[in-house]
Amino acid sequence: MTLKKDGNFGNLFNNKSRVAYTHSGVFHADDVCSTALLKIVFPDMEIRRVSKVPKDAEFAFDIGLGKYDHHQPDAEERTDGSLYAAFGLLWRDIGHRIMSQHDADIFDRCFVRGIDYTDTTGKPNPFSSIINAFNPSWDEDKSSDEAFWEAVEFATVALKKQFERVKSSEKAEKVVRDIIANKECYPTEHSLRLEFYLPYQRETCKKNIWYVTFPSNRDIGYWNICTVPISMEEPTSQRAPLLEEWVNGEKPKGCSFVHPAKFLACFEDYESAVNALEILEKRYESENLSYPKA
């Protein structure tokens, strides 16, 4: 993973000592993920867990009521009204060092915001619950600091995997743009053919493309049809869902599986997939079924 070099550590946080402080004792996903993020971006930073921030400290998070501590009456909010926690405040300022600002904003919505929401409301999410489980049990012979760094190690792996996935998606954009520009890759008017799966959602949702078909990575010779989202702000949305009758009634020829959520169908061969695409497009056009256009 390559980080963007847009200034040094001292300029960003005015932290000449290269030491950061966070709270000791019981930990949560907020301080754990904040620590993991800081160590990813600034490997030589020293993180110290304390019960009280020293008077000469230059940088602290999730403690001390400074810029990166949200435990105060005037805690910052996002534009949607959700509160920032330390992780979100740090991500807002350094996420662009890892990925584009556009992708950093998406990552905030898809991942960071959930961590912040749990920390500021107490309502759980799966990742925060996993991190909480690293805290020592009452009958466990392990210090809080030892458990904290185990949790940080786990969170670091998880975050790096997430960042690598974003980078991979960024690389896929150009490939998909080239495929979209190739008119031979349109088996039907509103569908696109890929020779193998790659993240297609961001580019296809910009065009009047409803479906993407590509070889299955589970069954040799099989082909999948997947729907295209309305936008990346609504990644689970569907511009033109698969037909309800395919889920609860008779499937088209060669179809072996249709997901109940109507975003995926699997076919025994490419010809069957194309036939199904033609059926879909004719139904939407002839019956004026509603779908959002690009």
Image (tube, grey):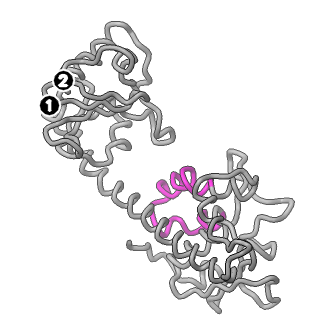
Rendering coords of residue 168 (x, y %): 33, 58
Q: Is residue 195 above or below residue 275?
A: below
Residue at the extreme right: 73
| Residue at the disc numbered 1 | 269
The magenta region covers: 89-114
Q: Is residue 178 left or right of residue 154?
A: left
Residue 52, percent from left and from top: 82, 83
Find numbered disc 1 in the image and state the secondary structure of the residue it sits on. loop
Q: In percent of the image, x 69 and y 80: which residue is there? A: 144
232 or 252: nearer the eye? 252
* Residue 110 covered by magenta stretch: yes
Task: Tell me, yes or no, whether the two marked residues, 2 and 1, touch with CB atoms within 8 Å.
Answer: yes
Upstream in sequence: badge 2 or badge 1: 2
Drawn side of residue 72 relative to residue 177, left or right: right
Local packing at callout 1 (Cα closer than 10 Å; few below 14, some 14-19, many 20+) is: some
Residue at horizontal 63%, vertical 58%?
Answer: 129
Q: Residue at x 53, y 69 (%)?
A: 155
Which mark is drawn over residue 61?
none
Q: Is residue 8 left or right of residue 190?
A: right
Q: Position of residue 86 (x, y in %)?
A: 69, 66
Numbered badge on residue 254: 2
Q: Mark 1 belongs to which amino acid?
A: Asp
Secondary structure beneath dot 2 equals loop
